[in-house]
């Protein structure tokens, strides 16, 4: 099937692309092989994302990006052990993590484009919302949330710090492509939005700016800290302390299915 071929192509792209290596850091590899999920474009959860308490009314459903959309391919790119290990210390984020966050997203955009081109080569239509001119971010909310898309596509559930925990953990990046190719959705093996989080609270003490509690995640405080990192390391920024040296760093702590 072409889906299997596409997965192999994606794996090969990740394995061979120079963009997945950091020349400045002795060829550090940023990402490992991905997890891939599929969501139906008519899933009822797309409407749920429009609720103000979830993402917001500006969040667009797949059919709003492409009227003939049938499926959404969502993926998680786990950071390599080298990137994650470097950031397990306390204090400021590691240089490896900053490269992983910034340069890794440049690679992620290249992967999005590669997936769109691969689908179009097979006669399908495809669009990557994050690369589309209609994509926007206002007040720290986008009209296409990769984490929420991944939740719908069966890749994982949310944690205390609002990261998404997958069976390969939470330390990494997400991406997605919408297509008119009708695929069978990946079953969600969860029913609760935080089912993969064991509530250990490890991420709370890991946060350098004290933005996380058991009840809430203070986004303004978090983004204020990220802005300080950006000023010091422009154009690179990031933190990831709540995603490293925690039980959900590279696995699902409720199943230990790595």
Image (cartoon, helix red, strand yellow):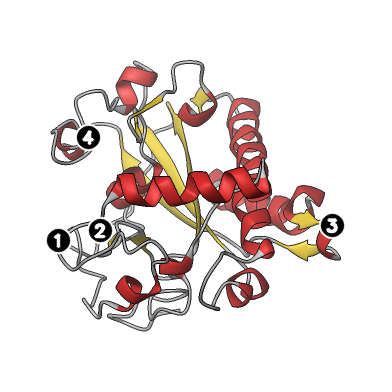
Nearer to us: label 3 or label 2: 3
Residue found 20% across the figure and 63% down from its top? 194
Q: Is residue 51 left or right of residue 126?
A: left
- Callout 2: helix, strand or loop? loop
Name above or below for residue 88 compared with residue 70. Answer: below
- Which residue carries the number 2 mark? 188
Q: Which mark is residue 191?
A: 1
- Which residue carries the number 4 mark? 46
Q: Is residue 215 left or right of residue 31?
A: left
Nearer to us: label 4 or label 3: 3
Of residues 44 and 134, the one nearer the viewer is 134
Instruction: Find out whether the residues at labels 4 and 1 contact each other: C-beta distance under 8 Å.
Output: no
Q: Which mark is residue 226?
A: none
Nearer to us: label 1 or label 2: 1
Residue 65 sits in quarter:
top left
Nearer to us: label 3 or label 1: 3
> Which of the marked residues, 4 or 2, is nearer the chain's N terminus?
4
- Callout 3: helix, strand or loop? helix
Q: Is residue 153 left or right of residue 113?
A: left
Q: Position of residue 29 (x, y in %)?
A: 73, 63
Instruction: Find out whether the residues at labels 1 and 2 contact each other: C-beta distance under 8 Å.
Output: yes
> Which of the marked residues, 4 or 1, is nearer the chain's N terminus?
4
Residue found 35% across the figure and 29% down from its top? 70
Nearer to us: label 4 or label 2: 4
Residue 63 sits in quarter:
top left
């Amino acid at each position: 099937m072409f889906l299997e071929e596409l997965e192999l192509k994606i794996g090969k792209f990740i394995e061979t692309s120079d963009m997945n290596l950091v020349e400045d850091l002795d060829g550090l590899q940023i990402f490992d092989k991905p997890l891939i999920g599929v969501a139906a474009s008519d899933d009822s959860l797309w409407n749920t994302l429009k609720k103000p308490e979830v993402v917001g009314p500006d969040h667009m459903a797949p059919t709003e990006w492409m009227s003939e959309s049938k499926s959404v391919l969502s993926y998680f790119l786990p950071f390599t052990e080298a990137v994650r290990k470097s950031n397990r210390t306390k204090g400021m984020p590691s240089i490896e993590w900053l490269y992983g966050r910034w340069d890794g997203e440049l690679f992620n955009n290249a992967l999005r484009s590669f997936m769109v081109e691969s689908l179009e080569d097979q006669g399908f239509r495809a669009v990557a919302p994050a690369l589309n001119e209609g994509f926007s971010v206002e007040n720290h909310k986008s009209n296409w949330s990769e984490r929420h898309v991944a939740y719908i596509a069966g890749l994982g559930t949310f944690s205390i710090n609002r990261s998404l925990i997958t069976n390969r953990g939470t330390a990494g990046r997400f991406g997605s492509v919408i297509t008119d190719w009708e695929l069978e959705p990946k079953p969600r093996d969860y029913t609760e939005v935080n089912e993969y989080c064991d509530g250990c609270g490890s991420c709370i003490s890991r946060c350098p700016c004290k933005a996380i509690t058991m009840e809430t995640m203070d986004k303004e405080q978090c983004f204020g800290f990220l802005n300080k990192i950006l000023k010091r390391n422009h154009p690179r920024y990031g933190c990831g302390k709540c995603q490293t040296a925690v039980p959900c760093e590279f696995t699902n702590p409720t199943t230990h299915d790595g």
